[in-house]
Image (cartoon, helix red, strand yellow):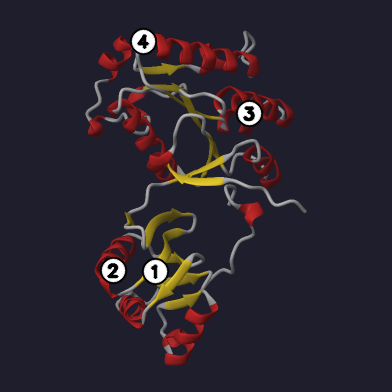
Amino acid sequence: METPWFAKRPVKDIRPGDHSWLAYSGPEERDSVIGPFVREGLETNEKVVYVTDAPAELLPGLGPRHRVDVEALGRTGQLRIISRRDACLDRRGGFAPGKMLETIGREVDAAFGQGFRAARFTTDYSCLIGEPGRSGLAVMLGCEHGVGNAVSPSTMAMAICQIDRRACPPDELAALRDTHEVLVEVNPEFDDGILKISRTFEPNGLRVEGELDAARHQVFAEQLAQVCLARRRVHLDFADLGFIDLGGLNLLAQQATVLPADEALVLDHLPPDVENVIEMVGWHRLPGLERGRERAFPETEGIA
């Protein structure tokens, strides 16, 4: 079986030409990606186009706490919130891929004429594919191929296509994902080029990549304590962890010992050498530490 290839990028690194995919597990993950995507565009003289029927104050990055003057940005043309009816539905309320492509082309041309340096597009397809009378998969795939053909060669346009991963079966979700070249992720909580720590949402926890040495114990301890505050079970994804010293392992053990009896740190995708050390010193017997999942196959990335 051919393994799909994707570029995985944090949302801060999305750039013109990127036709990106976000299959989110819930509002927290969606807002953690789309919010920065919207705000960064508005802060850097880029046009933001959001196709949605939701009111502006409920959209990621535009709520009252962000202090965004939606009306003023609308008057300048930098922020365009377009209803689905106007952007991509036909007269009978059915999804019209050609109309969506026309909307993208029109807004990119307008952005260039208005002097914006780029145009950012986003929409959520969950309602189109998850409701009764939904668009067929073939129609959605055709639309996504068309969006990719419009965005990928562009020096101005970038897009994030959103979908609630619960809106359709896994095989359909994988087919839609495969029409994109970029899987977009949340921005890391910490990244100094040696250690990278990022939030995960399903399961809730942290993904730890790179090398965790003595110089980075404090930041790891802070991130671990923070994510443990509101989560009953916290998963730590170590699939891309290259090194962890005994001090880092001791931080895990210390955190596990202070957890309530019904809570745990779940260690996913442990490298064999790290697992051997944990078993050798007996930390695997601590009630607050659990061995978790094995490494996922690439085919499941971006859908689960």
Q: What element carries label 3?
A: helix
Q: Is mark 4 on a helix, strand or loop?
A: helix
Q: Mark 2 points at which residue?
A: 216
Tell me: residue 239, above or below residue 139. below
Hey, what amino acid is under mark 1? Glu
Q: Residues within 10 Å of mark 2 (few under 14, many from 20)?
A: some
Q: How crowded is mark 1: few (under 14 residues within 10 Å), some or many (20 or more)?
A: some
Q: Residues within 10 Å of mark 4 (few under 14, many from 20)?
A: few
Mark toward the viewer: 3 or 2: 2
Distance from Cα at disc 2 to Cα at disc 1: 9 Å
Hey, what amino acid is under mark 2? Arg
Locate the N terminus by quadrant: bottom right
Q: Which of marks 3 and 4 is nearer the N terminus?
A: 4
- Residue at 69% from the left image edge and 26% from the top image edge: 142
Q: Is residue 184 left or right of residue 302?
A: left
Q: Which of marks 1 and 3 is nearer the N terminus?
A: 3
Q: Position of residue 18 (x, y in %)?
A: 51, 33
Q: What element carries label 1?
A: strand
Q: Name the residue under label 1.
A: 211
Distance from Cα at disc 3 to Cα at disc 2: 42 Å
Distance from Cα at disc 2 to Cα at disc 4: 46 Å
Q: Mark 3 points at which residue?
A: 144
Q: Can residue 134 be seen in this view?
A: no
Hey, what amino acid is under mark 4? Gln
Distance from Cα at disc 1 to Cα at disc 4: 46 Å
Label annotation for residue 114: 4
